[in-house]
Amino acid sequence: MLVIGNQADINQSGAVIDSTGVDDWNSKFDKNITDVERRICGVAGCLQGTFTTTATSDDVRGNVISSAQKITVDNLIPLVGNVTFDGEAVALERARLALTDYLTINKQVRDLLTKNQLDDASLLSTGNNKGQSSEAFARFTTEIGNVKQINVDIFDQTWKTVQDTLNRDMLWFIVIGYVAILIGIVVGVIHRERELR
């Protein structure tokens, strides 16, 4: 999703740099943003409503999660349909807000390009201040990165628990194995001794 999002951001820059090909750049931007949107919540237009019950809640709204779970994009359930761990829903909501800010700014960039105000469009497209495109896109990528990190941390924690259990159990299996071998040897020696008598 971030690769496609980055491609959309490149297309926005292309529209600013290549004013003769604006329509083509904007068309590519729209396609990429639709792909990003589908990967986040399932269908075009789903970014318009909030994902969570409140801004700080980690509960995805029922209608959002149920509709996202009915769809697959490249054989994957959209992110809001697969919220499992604490913090994911809040991070996805912040990503949604950042992406909608980014899309609002993109409309402003397009308006400036239509008016042939190339310097203003360039500044709005590349600026890192609040209300400028690069800042909003950076917030989006940060929040998607946070969703990824939450999952990586849970995976690492689960793997560590399993690994610790395996290490602990392996010691017991070794001890039990040696005891079983010793018992087998003793039983075998006793049995053999009886045969020899």
Image (tube, rainbow, N blue to C red):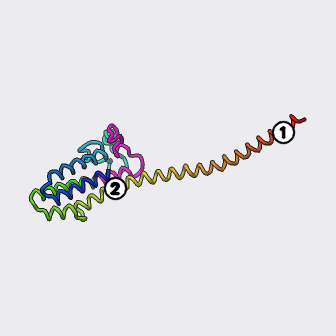
Q: Looking at the picture, how far across and down is residue 169, in whole percent?
A: 63, 48
Please state which amino acid type lies under the numbered disc 2.
Glu
* Residue depicted at x 9% and y 60%: 116
* Side of 33 where 153 appears, left or right: right
Please state which amino acid type lies under the numbered disc 1.
Ile
Q: SS of the residue at dot 2? A: helix
Closer to the camera, 86 or 124?
Answer: 124
* Residue depicted at x 38% and y 44%: 82
* Residue depicted at x 55% and y 49%: 162
Q: Looking at the picture, how far across and down is residue 62, in whole percent?
A: 33, 41
The residue where tag 2 is placed is: 143
Farthest-out residue, left:
115
Residues packed near mark 1 inside 10 Å, few (<14), some (14 to 19) or many (20 plus)? few
Looking at the image, is 184 positioned above or below residue 114? above
**Rounded to the nearest whole Å, what is the CA distance between mark 2 and mark 1?**
69 Å
Q: SS of the residue at dot 1? A: helix
Identify the magenta region.
Answer: 69-96
Q: Looking at the picture, how far across and down is residue 16, in whole percent?
A: 17, 59
The residue where tag 1 is placed is: 190
Closer to the camera, 115 or 101?
Answer: 115
Q: Looking at the picture, how far across and down is residue 106, in whole percent?
A: 19, 55
Quadrant assignment, res 187: top right
Is-magenta flag for residue 52?
no
Quadrant assignment, res 70: top left
